[in-house]
Amino acid sequence: MGLFDTIKGETKRNFIARADEAKGEIIYKYPEKNVRMLTQLTVDADEVALFVKDGKVEGKLGPGRHQLDTKNIPFLSRLLEKFTGGDLFISEIFFVSTREHTGVKFGGPIGDVRDPETGLGIGTMVYGDFSIRVTEPERLVVGLVGMGRSSNEDFVGWFKSQVLKVTRDRIAELLVKKRWPLLDVTSGAYTEEIETEVIGGLKPHVDSYGLTVVRMGNFHVSIKEEDEATLKKFSKDAAYSRLAGGFNQYAQGQAMLGASEGMAKGGGHGSGSDGALQGMGLGMGMGMAQMFANNQQQARQAPQGPVPEAAGGGEARSPAQRLKELHELHKAGVLSDDEYSAKRAELMKLL
């Protein structure tokens, strides 16, 4: 090290402030512990400087320029190193920002979440950002020093893990208690409710550290595309079974439709054979449609009183009720436009 570097280093030791590269950090720990008396310490307008020794906050300085001297800062006398004749004191110095820090990104796996509508366990992710503010710097520094997480990187990493943990617990709880379909959650239909629950759930975890989560943003719960397709298929099957009057009728109809399609496509060795098979397929398909129509007609003609159970264990509902369900499924994206139009036309005939 040259003479110029030595002089430069000594000059720096006479002035203490947050490093320029750490201006955006929530917490910054000054790298030196041995501090000379009469050193100039500068605290920015949106932060405080804490003096910590043996895990205890001995004093705090607010915004401004301060000359570190026991005459005008009495608490420094508790930090003096006696062997130096009072020219040096030993302390960790933390600069803690008190403004709101926005756009802190987080994200990760929530784990398998059971969809109330289908009963399937689906791997779920969450990502977004939040804003955070330090309300009690002393409690934050003491808590972080006690955990051995005194750097800004350690602190932010720890806090993100708290957000992810609470988010995971809250989403799983809401799905069970409120029976929200997972497809509705991933579509963003309940984003505001989830954000409110997460902020409320974080409060007891961060209050003891003098922190508060002000708001969350760009919050999104997601699943894999293939899982989304599976959920839509199962939801569609469940919806069709309700419209058909029960699972048994729907399963029979699906089997008949599959058989009719297989016969129509299977073909024979001659055109006559093809025509016969296609006729059989068409007949079975028409039979399925007639079964569905008969089921609807019986429901309409049923005497007033308690609603009888359908053969599949479900409840027989009026065509108007089923039209409403059909509309909701189409609006949720479970049914395509073509599927919705075809099924709606069938139900309209029963009105």
Image (spheres, grey):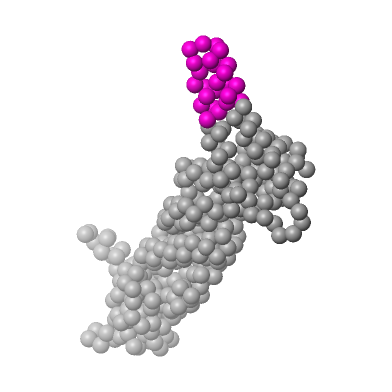
**Relative depth, front residue between 118 and 64:** 118
Is 133 above or below relative to 298?
A: below
Q: Position of residue 61 (x, y in %)?
A: 45, 79
Compared across the picture, whether 187 is left or right of 114 comes to right
Q: Position of residue 56 (x, y in %)?
A: 36, 83
Compared across the picture, whether 70 is left or right of 194 comes to left
Give the overall secondary structure of the magenta segment. Answer: helix
Q: Residue at x 50, y 50 (%)?
A: 222
**Relative depth, front residue between 78 and 206:** 206
**Relative depth, front residue between 284 and 233:** 284
Q: Position of residue 132 (x, y in %)?
A: 51, 66
Is 233 above or below relative to 219?
A: above
The residue furthest top is 270
Residue 297 magenta: no
Residue 269 magenta: yes
Please identify the quadrant where the C terminus is shown.
top right
Please identify the quadrant where the N terminus is shown.
bottom left
Q: Which residues are magenta?
A: 259-282
Q: Residue at x 74, y 51 (%)?
A: 302
Is 285 above or below relative to 164?
A: above
Q: Position of residue 105 (x, y in %)?
A: 47, 56
